[in-house]
């Protein structure tokens, strides 16, 4: 599992977890701000994403499900002899951080979820999403076709517009390289195919780690209303802050990293 570590001090580590289809590069401007605050940054690429290859078993590997990713990250932390003081997850990364805490794999002082993808999709899409993703992940031609189409700048522009976020030229260029990679596309599809959010939603009341939720009001990927729904499901001991970020979309940490870090420590 590929991981970027900075000025290693395991006792003061922060674990940064990207979402589906992302990579550690999404923390490129957040990480230095955390280092300035005295933290060691651990920012891995999730299994099947970017510089972390597909696990044994391919698209059907248990490591691509939520509990499996939690265990894989726990193994990484053990190899690094690191005990994160804080876990920050974006989108599906927040779900992984919560799963790790629920399963006793990490014991951070708090978890921060940025546009946390923790609740199942509503409407007709919810029940159909995983089976459709499984079919797509099982067809080797699909990731190659997606990556080929994503090389068109107009396609990437539409994908990013669908997040409700506006990125700078560097962010656009990095995502262009990322989504043009068939192996990365295969990993993202496989992750979606193996995800089980209903179980996590049922387990939320058992979380004992304070969970702060930062919600971009322009998010077009995860409904902003989910923030309050997640907050209400938590036990009082885990009910941290619910912060609404005006003018920011799903990729809020890439749009306004300084503002986001200020909110984390606000």
Image (spheres, rainbow, N blue to C red):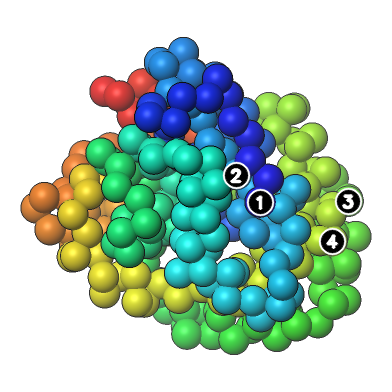
Residue 226 visible in the snapshot: no
Quarter location, residue 145? bottom right
Q: Earlier in the sequence, mark 3 or mark 4?
A: 3
Quarter location, residue 108? top left
Q: CA distance from mark 3 to mark 1?
A: 26 Å
- Residue count near mark 4 (Cα–Cα under 10 Å), binned few <14, some 14–19, many ≥20: many
Q: Secondary structure at mark 4?
A: helix
Q: CA distance from mark 1 to mark 4?
A: 18 Å
Which mark is on residue 44?
2
Camera-side mark, 4 or 2: 2
Question: Do the residues bearing badges 3 and 1 touch, measured as CB atoms within 8 Å?
Answer: no
Kindly identify which residue carries mark 1: 1
Q: Position of residue 203 (x, y in %)?
A: 26, 70
Q: CA distance from mark 3 to mark 4?
A: 11 Å
Q: Residue at x 33, y 35 (%)?
A: 85
Left or right position of 12 against 186: left
Question: Do the residues bearing badges 1 and 2 touch, measured as CB atoms within 8 Å?
Answer: yes
Which mark is on residue 182?
4
Camera-side mark, 3 or 2: 2
Camera-side mark, 1 or 4: 1
Quarter location, residue 223? bottom left
Q: Position of residue 28 (x, y in %)?
A: 62, 28
């Amino acid at each position: 599992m590929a991981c970027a570590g900075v000025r290693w001090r395991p006792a003061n580590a922060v674990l940064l977890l990207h979402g589906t289809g992302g990579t550690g590069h999404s923390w490129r401007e957040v990480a230095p701000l955390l280092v300035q605050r005295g933290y060691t940054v651990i920012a891995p690429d999730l299994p099947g994403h970017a510089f972390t290859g597909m696990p044994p078993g391919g698209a059907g590997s248990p490591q691509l499900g939520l509990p499996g990713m939690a265990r894989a990250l726990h193994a990484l932390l053990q190899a690094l002899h690191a005990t994160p003081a804080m876990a920050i997850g974006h989108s599906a990364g927040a779900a992984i951080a919560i799963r790790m805490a629920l399963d006793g794999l990490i014991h951070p002082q708090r978890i921060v979820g940025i546009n946390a993808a923790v609740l199942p999709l509503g409407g007709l899409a919810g029940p159909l999403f995983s089976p459709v993703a499984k079919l797509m992940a099982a067809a080797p031609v699909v990731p190659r076709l997606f990556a080929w189409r994503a090389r068109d700048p107009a396609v990437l522009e539409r994908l990013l517009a669908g997040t409700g976020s506006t990125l700078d030229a560097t962010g656009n260029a990095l995502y262009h390289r990322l989504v043009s990679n068939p192996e990365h596309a295969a990993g993202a599809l496989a992750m979606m195919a193996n995800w089980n959010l209903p179980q996590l939603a049922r387990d939320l009341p058992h979380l004992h780690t304070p969970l702060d939720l930062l919600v971009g009001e322009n998010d077009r990927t995860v409904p902003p209303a989910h923030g309050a729904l997640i907050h209400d499901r938590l036990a009082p001991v885990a009910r941290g802050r619910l912060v609404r970020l005006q003018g920011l979309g799903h990729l809020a940490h890439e749009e306004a990293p300084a503002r986001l870090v200020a909110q984390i420590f606000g």
